[in-house]
Image (cartoon, rainbow, N blue to C red):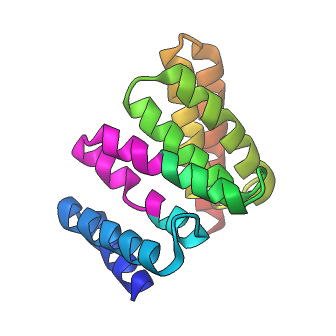
Amino acid sequence: MVEARAVRGRALGDVGRLVEGIGELQAARDDALQLFGNNSPLVGTLQQNPVAYLVDLGELAAAELNARESVRTVKLHAQAESFSHAGTLASLGAVLLAQRRADEALALLAPAADTLARVLGPGHDAALLVRTQQALALALALLGRLDEAGQLLASSDALFAGAAGAS
């Protein structure tokens, strides 16, 4: 039931029904909290689910709270160089970037992008990797590091084009 509710919440969010989707995702998280406790890996994953939708609604404080709690919980169970941990760091980095906290975002996005590139391998069709690299490039640009940002965007575009050509 928990996973079904989470799937429904993501589907609602993906079609723009953000408030309903977030409600379902939060209900799924609350159900998992009751069943498995605060430090469950499932709870950590469910905590991250509404983050992008909260950002889309402009609820940046709530998005940050969810993202930080997801990082905390996933960190208890996942290795630092894992896809799961990198995904939570990328999510929190994107929230911080939306808050124009580029220095803090860069500190999370750079290792997340490195880990995702290493774990997934070069040329992998990975939307998360491309989005993380694009967010990292934005953080660099906001900090005035335009050459680095441009190079990263070029490699991100090449990765995306290579993945699109392979399908």
Please name the residue shown 64% across and 28% down the image. Answer: 107
Q: Does the magenta stretch include residue 58?
A: yes
Q: With 114 as the anchor, is 166 left or right in this view?
A: left
The residue drawn where x is 66% and y is 50% is 86
Q: What quarter of the picture does the N terminus occupy?
A: bottom left
Instruction: Measuring from the top left, give residue 53's x and y in whole percent.
Output: 31, 54
* Residues rendered magenta in the picture: 47-67
State which quadrant residue 162 falls in: bottom right
| Residue located at (52% from left, 19% from top) | 141
| Position of 147 relative to 111 (above/below) | above
Task: Give percent across and percent down for residue 69.
Answer: 50, 51
Name which residue lies at 28% across and 63% down. 22
* Marker count (numbered): 0
Q: Please state, as top left, top right, bottom left or bottom right, where the C terminus lies in the image.
A: bottom right
- On whether residue 50 falls in the magenta region, the answer is yes
One can see residue 161 in this view = no
**Which residue of the protein is positioned furthest toward the bottom in this rendering?**
1
Q: In this rendering, does residue 6 appear at all? A: yes
* Left or right, 107 with reference to 29: right
User: Is 132 located above or below residue 2 in the figure?
Assistant: above
Q: Where is residue 142 in the image (x, y as percent from the top left)?
A: 48, 17
| Residue with the most extreme top position | 144
Asked whether 160 or 61 is in front, the reply is: 61
